Image (tube, rainbow, N blue to C red):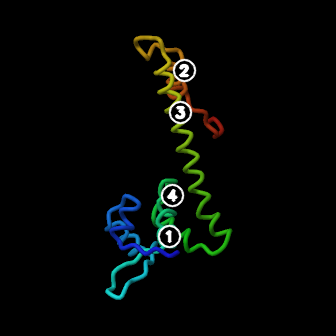
């Protein structure tokens, strides 16, 4: 079954404004069909593409990267595009985990002043202590 939706219905389905879909179309990310009156019609494949764009954006990819990814025709190109995105996402996850550890430490702390918590102090010391340099020491 092939359901066609107009731009208002398609945008509403994903909680987007219609101008977002027009922008993505102008960027070459979407290619909705047109009816006899020239109005955009979004079919099942278009809705799948919309969902894909949103998922990739949630993963941290920018629209230009998503466009490049959709044009990638081979595995090597896809890997070249996704590798930096994966590294960036790993970095964001590490930072989020550190933030969560600090917040959970504050929630589990019995001290009135959270800055007196041993766990809090350890986390701060890790951040303010000397950085481990990978370079050879200066002579």
- Label 2, on which residue? 122
Q: Residue 125, relative to residue 28: is it above or below?
A: above
Marking on residue 126: none
Rendered residue at 47%/68% (across/down): 47
Instruction: Evaluate if marks 1 and 4 touch, with contact meaning CB atoms under 8 Å apart.
Output: no
Instruction: Evaluate if marks 3 and 1 touch, with contact meaning CB atoms under 8 Å apart.
Output: no
The alpha-carbon separation of the residues under discs 1 and 2 comes to: 44 Å
Among the two numbered marks 3 and 4 on one chain, the one whose residue lies closer to the N terminus: 4
Instruction: Evaluate if marks 2 and 3 touch, with contact meaning CB atoms under 8 Å apart.
Output: no
Crowding at label 3, few (<14), some or many (≥20) Cα neighbours within 10 Å?
A: few
Residue 122 in percent (x, y) is at 54, 20
- Label 4, on which residue? 55
Q: Residue 124, relative to residue 52: is it above or below?
A: above
Rendered residue at 36%/62% (across/down): 12
Q: Is residue 20 left or right of residue 28?
A: left
Among the two numbered marks 1 and 4 on one chain, the one whose residue lies closer to the N terminus: 4
The alpha-carbon separation of the residues under discs 3 and 4 comes to: 24 Å
Which secondary structure lies at badge 1?
helix
- Label 3, on which residue? 98
- Label 1, on which residue? 67
The alpha-carbon separation of the residues under discs 2 and 3 comes to: 12 Å
Among the two numbered marks 2 and 4 on one chain, the one whose residue lies closer to the N terminus: 4
The extreme right residue here reads 75
The alpha-carbon separation of the residues under discs 3 and 1 comes to: 32 Å
């Amino acid at each position: 079954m092939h359901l066609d939706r107009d731009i208002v219905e398609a945008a509403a389905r994903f909680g987007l404004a219609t101008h977002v879909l027009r922008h993505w179309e102008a960027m070459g990310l979407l290619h909705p069909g047109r009816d006899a009156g020239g109005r955009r019609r979004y079919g099942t494949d278009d809705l799948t593409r919309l969902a894909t764009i949103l998922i990739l954006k949630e993963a941290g990819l920018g629209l230009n990267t998503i466009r490049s990814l959709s044009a990638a025709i081979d595995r090597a190109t896809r890997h070249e595009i996704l590798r930096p995105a994966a590294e960036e996402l790993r970095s964001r996850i590490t930072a989020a985990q550190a933030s969560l550890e600090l917040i959970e430490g504050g929630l589990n702390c019995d001290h009135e002043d959270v800055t007196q918590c041993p766990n809090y102090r350890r986390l701060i010391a890790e951040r303010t202590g000397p950085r481990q340099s990978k370079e050879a020491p200066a002579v």
